[in-house]
Image (cartoon, rainbow, N blue to C red):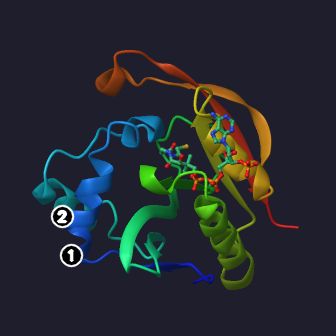
Amino acid sequence: METERILLRPWRDDDATALFKYASDPDVGPRAGWPPHKSVEESLEIIHTVFHSDTTWAIELKATGEAIGCIGYLSSNGCPIPAREGEPLVGYWIAKPYWDQGICTEALRLVTEHILTATNIPSLISGHFVENPASGRVMEKCGFMATGETYFDATQYQGEGKPIRVLRWERR
Ligand SMILES: CC(C)(COP(=O)(O)OP(=O)(O)OC[C@H]1O[C@@H](n2cnc3c(N)ncnc32)[C@H](O)[C@@H]1OP(=O)(O)O)[C@@H](O)C(=O)NCCC(=O)NCCS
């Protein structure tokens, strides 16, 4: 899946250095509910485990060939967001130097287009911390509609729980 400036492709071992550079930034992971990466070795481990899925993609900036973010969908079982039976959960992040350039919106549109054309998945669920409205804007621009709020116990990462705004995308 691609646009003029980005390519969604599987993660590779040689992305570990870029992944560590961007995912060790304390402004990135905690906004999505995960802790900053602590070493290139940990980033490689994440590539081998968390990112090892047919529906998780590196967001490659074509101009540099570098992985500058991640997007994907996975089972919502066990997540704190109220989802329908079997409804996949979408998640994403972009490296901080590339924020506010429309890149995540472009990537999420590629994913919803993929859902429409290559699957029969009827809907997607996602959510963002209320204190992280930029993520909500991305979803709204891609046709997600707010359904309400829930709460995430983020104590292991940030010392406090946080309200989450929940949004759903539906096939039409
Ligand atoms: C959230 C995130 C993915 C957005 O990626 P991005 O590539 O910068 O997103 P885009 O440029 O496509 O769109 C960002 C939108 O948010 C808006 N925005 C940015 N900061 C904002 C703020 N503080 N309040 C409200 N809107 C804001 C931008 O103006 C833009 O909307 P617009 O096109 O209507 O002007 C990125 O900031 C990120 O990775 N953050 C850390 C991890 C994270 O939050 N992941 C999502 C967890 S739910």
* Residue found farthest to the right: 172
Q: Identify the residue at image location x=13%, y=51%.
A: 39
CB-based contact (under 8 Å), mark 1 and mark 2: yes
Q: Identify the residue at image location x=51%, y=64%.
A: 72
For label 1, the residue is 13
Please give the count of numbered marks on the rendered protein: 2
Looking at the picture, does residue 164 appear above or below residue 111?
A: above
Residue at mark 1 to residue at mark 2: CA–CA distance: 6 Å
Q: Earlier in the sequence, mark 1 or mark 2?
A: 1
Q: In which quarter of the image is residue 158?
A: top left
For the residue pair 22 and 52, the one nearer the viewer reads as: 22
Report x, y in % for residue 69. 43, 62
Three-letter amino acid code of the residue under disc 2:
Leu
Horizontal relation, residue 113 to residue 63: left or right: right
Q: Identify the residue at image location x=23%, y=46%.
A: 37
The label on residue 44 is 2
Horizontal relation, residue 101 to residue 18: left or right: right
